[in-house]
Amino acid sequence: MTLDAAVEPPRELLPRHIAIVMDGNGRWAQQRSLMRTAGHREGAKAVRRIVKACSERGIEVLTLFAFSSENWRRPRPEVEVLMNLFLTTLRREIRRLHTANVRMRFIGDRSAFAATLQDYIAKAEQRTAANTGLTLVIAANYGGRWDIAQASRRVAEEAAAGRLRPGEVTVELLHQYTCLADLPEPDLFIRTGGEQRISNFLLWQLAYTELYFTDRLWPDFDVEALDAACAAFASRQRRFGQTSEQVAGVADA
């Protein structure tokens, strides 16, 4: 779906967990003859308004793909700007998010980040750990394949230690070792910028997620666009392998 005009759906029809690939910062800047870094700074403003909107709508979890494990391949000056922007935004937003009762989580291999950034990530998680509002998950130096690999490695370590037999490895058990095991799986995946692919984001968790693609570039993604995505989600029938008749029967029960 690419239509970006809708009224906010009733709260009971909203997704519990929204995951977003925030694509198009660089193109937004290029269209305005600006440096790509200007697009990333404008994209940070979009993050603020979407976090606020999700909090106001009672969304339980919002997961944002901030920096993938493949983004290290970008030009070094751009990566440095992204890291500095990440740190600056984190410093500036921790207090505001804490006041808004937002709980922050970070997923990905944070060991590749500078010690200062790792420290602020830990502080953000610790300071907001007891908050009960929106859980904001930031995927940074994250990849879906990495997530599955690290879960598999941990299961293998359990088996090597004799605490687990191979026959005990099930889908449910492996899921317990993935990054978001304690949270509901994403109901709605949104990708901005016109591309229609997942790009190694939450590969395990998106198995039954509704996918929504929009041509809007991330800096232009606003509350109206979020409501359009949620309205598209609300209009779909989620069957999880069942037939439409079976789902309708459950709904009527």
Image (cartoon, rainbow, N blue to C red):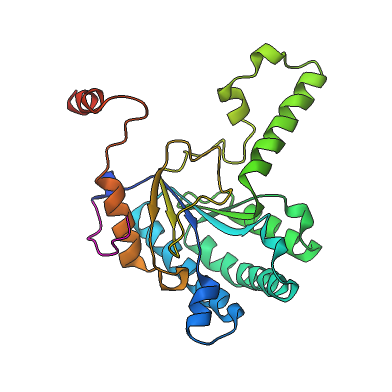
Q: Majority secondary structure of the magenta segment? A: loop
Identify the magenta region: 1-9
Task: State the residue in front, 98 or 66.
Answer: 66
**In the image, residue 107 lies in the stretch drawn in magenta:** no
x and y, in percent, of residue 55 in the image = 40, 57
Going by the image, does 146 lie left or right of 184? right
Residue shown at the point (74%, 59%) measured from the top left: 118
Tell me which corner region of the image, top left, top right, bottom left or bottom right, holds residue 39: bottom right
Residue 87 versus residue 122 in the image, above or below = below
**In the image, residue 4 lies in the stretch drawn in magenta:** yes
Residue shown at the point (57%, 40%) measured from the top left: 180
Residue 130 versus residue 86 in the image, above or below = above
Q: Which residue lies furthest to the left in this view?
A: 252
Tell me which corner region of the image, top left, top right, bottom left or bottom right, holds residue 145: top right
Tell me which corner region of the image, top left, top right, bottom left or bottom right, holds residue 222: bottom left
x and y, in percent, of residue 244 in the image = 24, 28
Which quadrant, please, contains the C terminus? top left
Task: State the residue in front, 104 or 229.
Answer: 229
x and y, in percent, of residue 164 in the image = 73, 16
Residue shown at the point (57%, 24%) measured from the top left: 171
Residue shown at the point (48%, 82%) measured from the top left: 31
x and y, in percent, of residue 60 in the image = 43, 47
